[in-house]
């Protein structure tokens, strides 16, 4: 089938909140390089096969220059990927590597292990509060959302008391359909000012947080970052720390409770927590938009020539269900190993905070299994509803009882 | 088994350290991989193979 023959609207709606659209299988097998129309009305090229998505995400010819004049806009209002601020952080090469290494040292396995007891305490307190309020609780609002927010606020040295504002600012950046352009711009202006004031205050009095340490390194002449890069790094981490893991907590727990055998298996053998977290990341059919890339030069993917100016959308969620990469890809196997899923992307730009996300998700399961072994969904799984329009997929609420 | 790592490719994801902490570590100053044991014992082969398979930048090479 030629890519010219059909144009799909993207994102493709899920038939049910936890199930993949049937379209994925057809695309992978018959139309791996597909033309799609984005919410903005602009055209893009969608990739759904594991090998293609992995290769493109790791290939520097597929850039993140989504502000190029002929790049597809994701939504009419712009948003995260088309935002000029996203271009402040270097896109590739040595500059990107230097930026990455200054920041990623905050997310090493050893640091995550050191943070784990504090995360566990936060998780236990949140569960105690939810239990005190009585069933049913909303695992998203009561637990999944606050936990990563408290953790990232602590890392950045910003007060968790301001979390409602952060949530709103994050949502305006990540939601592709909900806000008008003026609302998004006003919110981004406020967010920029807030972080600017925060960085200025830290510069006067350094703390032991990530932003203080970035400031302490000095400017570019000392091997550090510019003021603007520090500020935008803070904004990016705060947004990234909000929606992604928060939504994943709700989806992971829902997937596990949707089939009681999964939950029982974990209760019987908590040593499966690590592989269960990886399999939940792979199996997540509602992970959101995927990752867009822009081609400044003509390039070939899977035998198809993509002209310069093409915007490519990589669906990691579709790739993660590819039978050619994962045996029984449509089965959730809590002991799957190795599990080289693409939930965090691939290559030099793969998720900076993935060790943090993994640790948070492991802590979530460890605490829930220990404190609420009788946990169950308080609604039939068919009634779980996906969040609309968000670049990062999630469930609106996750009603639970115990 | 002989293990080599490519520091230039490494993006500091830390998966290898989580899976095989006796074989891999990360530098404190930039999060980049360091090899603690280039010829790990048989009891660690499974974990090292898994680390190589899931490394997001394919920065771990194994010769078996």
Image: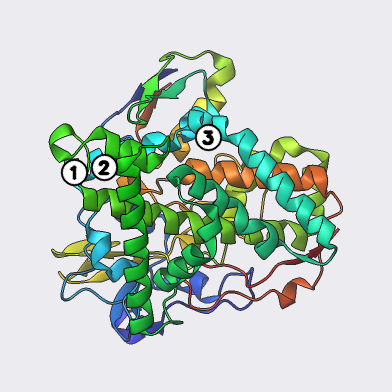
Give the alpha-carbon distance from disc 1 to disc 2, as whole Å.
6 Å
Say which element carries label 1: helix
Left or right relative to A203: residue A276: right
Give the alpha-carbon distance from disc 3 to disc 1, as whole Å.
26 Å
User: 10 Å neighbourhood of mark 1: few (<14), some, or many (≥20)?
Assistant: few
- Going 52% across and 25% down the picture, which residue do you hit? B20
Identify residue for label 2: A99
Residues B12 and A54: in front is: B12
User: 10 Å neighbourhood of mark 2: few (<14), some, or many (≥20)?
Assistant: many
Q: Position of residue A217 (x, y in %)?
A: 26, 33
Q: Chain ID for label 2?
A: A
- Going 20% across and 68% down the picture, which residue do you hit? A305
The C terminus of chain A - image quarter: bottom right
Q: Mark number for residue A112?
A: 3
Is residue A320 something that shows in the picture? no
Q: Position of residue B10 (x, y in %)?
A: 33, 34
Do the residues indicated by labels 3 and 2 lie within the same chain of the protein? yes
Q: Position of residue A351 (x, y in %)?
A: 41, 49
Residues A149 and A361: in front is: A149
Q: Chain ID for label 1?
A: A
Say which element carries label 2: helix
Identify residue for label 1: A95
């Amino acid at each position: 089938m030629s890519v010219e023959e059909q144009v799909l609207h993207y994102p493709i709606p899920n038939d049910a909140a936890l199930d993949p659209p049937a379209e994925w299988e057809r695309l992978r097998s018959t139309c791996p390089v597909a033309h799609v129309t984005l919410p903005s009305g602009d055209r893009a090229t969608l990739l759904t096969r594991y090998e293609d998505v992995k290769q493109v995400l790791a290939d520097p010819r597929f850039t993140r220059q989504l502000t190029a004049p002929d790049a597809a806009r994701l939504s009419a209002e712009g948003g995260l990927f088309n935002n000029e601020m996203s271009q402040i952080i270097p896109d590739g090469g040595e500059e990107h590597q230097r930026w990455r290494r200054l920041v990623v040292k905050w997310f090493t396995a050893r640091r995550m292990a050191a943070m784990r007891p504090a995360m566990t305490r936060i998780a236990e307190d949140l569960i105690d509060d939810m239990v005190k309020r009585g069933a049913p609780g909303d695992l998203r609002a009561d637990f999944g959302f606050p936990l990563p927010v408290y953790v990232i606020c602590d890392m950045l040295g910003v007060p968790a008391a301001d979390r409602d504002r952060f949530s709103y600012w994050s949502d305006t950046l990540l939601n592709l359909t909900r806000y008008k352009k003026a609302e998004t711009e006003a919110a981004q202006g406020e967010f920029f000012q807030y972080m600017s004031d925060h960085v200025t205050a830290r510069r006067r009095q350094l703390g032991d947080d990530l932003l203080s340490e970035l400031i302490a390194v000095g400017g570019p002449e000392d091997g550090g970052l510019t003021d603007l890069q520090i500020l935008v790094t803070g904004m990016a981490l705060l947004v990234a720390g909000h929606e992604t893991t928060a939504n994943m907590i709700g989806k992971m727990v829902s997937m596990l409770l949707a089939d009681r055998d999964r939950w029982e298996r974990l209760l019987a053998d908590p040593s499966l927590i690590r592989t269960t977290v990886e399999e939940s990341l792979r199996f997540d059919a509602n992970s959101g938009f995927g990752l867009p890339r822009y081609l400044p030069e003509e390039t070939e993917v899977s035998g198809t020539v993509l002209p310069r100016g093409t915007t490519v959308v990589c669906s990691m969620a579709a790739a993660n269900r590819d039978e050619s990469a994962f045996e029984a890809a449509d089965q959730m196997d809590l002991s799957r190993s190795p599990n080289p899923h693409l939930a965090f992307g691939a290559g030099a730009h793969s998720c900076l905070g993935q060790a943090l996300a993994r640790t948070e998700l492991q802590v979530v399961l460890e605490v829930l299994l220990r404190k609420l072994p009788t946990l169950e969904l308080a609604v039939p799984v068919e009634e779980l509803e996906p969040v609309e329009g968000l670049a990062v997929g999630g469930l609106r609420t996750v009603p639970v009882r115990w | 088994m002989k293990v080599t790592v490519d520091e230039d490719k490494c993006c500091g994801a830390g998966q290898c350290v989580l899976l095989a902490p006796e074989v891999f570590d990360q530098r404190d100053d930039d999060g980049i991989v360091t090899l603690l044991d280039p010829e790990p014992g048989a009891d660690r082969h499974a974990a090292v193979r898994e680390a190589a398979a899931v490394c997001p930048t394919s920065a771990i090479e194994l010769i078996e």
